[in-house]
Image (cartoon, rainbow, N blue to C red):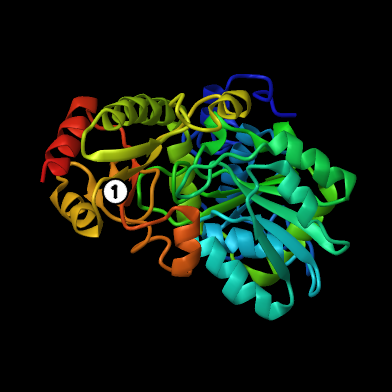
Amino acid sequence: MDQFKNMGFETKAIHTAQEPDSEFGSVMPPIHLSSTYAQSTPGTFKKYDYIRAGNPTRSSYSKCVAALEGAEHGFAYSSGCAATTTLMQCFKAGDHIIAGDDMYGGTFRLFDKVLRKFGLEFSFVDLTNPENFEKAIRPNTRLVWLETPTNPTLKISDIDAISKIAQQSKILTAVDNTFMSPYFQNPLKWGADVVMHSATKYINGHSDVLGGLLLTNDNSLAEDLSFYTLSTGAVASPFDSYLALRSLKTLAVRMQTHQKNAIAVAEFLEGHSAVERVIYPGLSSHPQYDLAKKQMSGFGGMITFYVKSGLNDARRFLENVKVFTLAESLGGVESLVEHPAIMTHASIPPDKRKALGIDDTLIRLSVGIETQSDLIQDLDQALSQ
């Protein structure tokens, strides 16, 4: 029994599945790098037999994140795309999956360019309106895939409403919770069946680990995930698991500072003459502000905004930031800025990008935990260029 189950988020992040080791009393769980384990007789072993099937460090890590998401089962992978791919292996050729029309470019590429070749069918619809989901359901629909907030336009879907519709048709609901982290949003609480994280982002939070996670309370789905994880082997390495587990200990304080800085930056940008529009769930101007307050306990560190004029001005701004770093990815302690149309969402066809509002003037910020005034000053001087 987990003695920390009913304790606070911060306590669970620091202690769940991380008790001092029995032999030496080490406060920090050691890294178990062994790829294989001794057997007393053929087929008889203590707990682990081979690293692809299980590893003590990876187990501690996945159990800790599961506790933070309110899940009974957790699986750690080598990347977010690996986690998503493993979930999709639970379905067969001819199965239909409904996904949001605005999503991370890598996920769209995986769905549209890779998994279609194996017979999975996909529909991409605007899931900010649950009725759109209901209309898109077919007799062979097996899964609805949500990003909420979406990447990069920060649209929000009603997890509760969509999950209820899905349950009526025996459809699984999966939520990519990367942008919010378990600290600000827990989709299983709102009826989702499985949660995915790119652990590369906020969970690790230091831009030095590639990883992914799947969390669920569905025992049947967990059995399938366990089988496909073992069979395909895209598991997190012990060292990456150790680093991410270490980072979990500061997730709460990091997310608090990400949000504090992001709110200040969003308000600054909203009043800047060089900015056309700001999208941030914590601003009352966000079209789904009330829904954000309902299903999220905070608003996160991601901001999208549009500069006035065109691509040349956007490029000049991006080339002149000094505290913000022009780079892909997000969720690290350092602030990052990127141009989705050229960088993270280049794999999405231009006409689809345009329809979604991912145009040449759109900028995405991952607001870090630096000194707030330094971030605002940096944006101000870059916008003045």
The reply to whether residue 26 is visible in this rendering is: yes
Q: Nearer the viewer, residue 2 or 130?
A: 130
At horizontal 61% and vertical 65% (from top left) the residue drawn is: 36
Residue 249 x %, y %? 46, 32
Q: Judge whether 2 appears above or below 362 on screen.
A: above
Residue type highlighted by circle 1: Val
Q: Which residue is mark 1?
A: 337
Q: Nearer the viewer, residue 204 or 143?
A: 143
Q: Judge whether 380 appears above or below 117 on screen.
A: above
The reply to whether residue 226 is visible in this rendering is: no
Looking at the image, the residue that sits furthest to the bottom is 117
Q: Judge whether 43 appears above or below 367 on screen.
A: below
Q: Judge whether 329 appears above or below 70 on screen.
A: below
At horizontal 19% and vertical 26% (from top left) the residue drawn is: 373
Q: Secondary structure at mark 1?
A: strand
Looking at the image, the residue that sits furthest to the front is 309
Point out the image quarter for the N terminus.
top right
146 sits left or right of 328 in the view: right
Residue 68 x %, y %? 61, 33
Residue 348 x %, y %? 48, 66
175 sits left or right of 358 in the view: right
**What is the number of callouts on the image?**
1
373 sits left or right of 136 in the view: left
At horizontal 55% and vertical 39% (from top left) the residue drawn is: 23
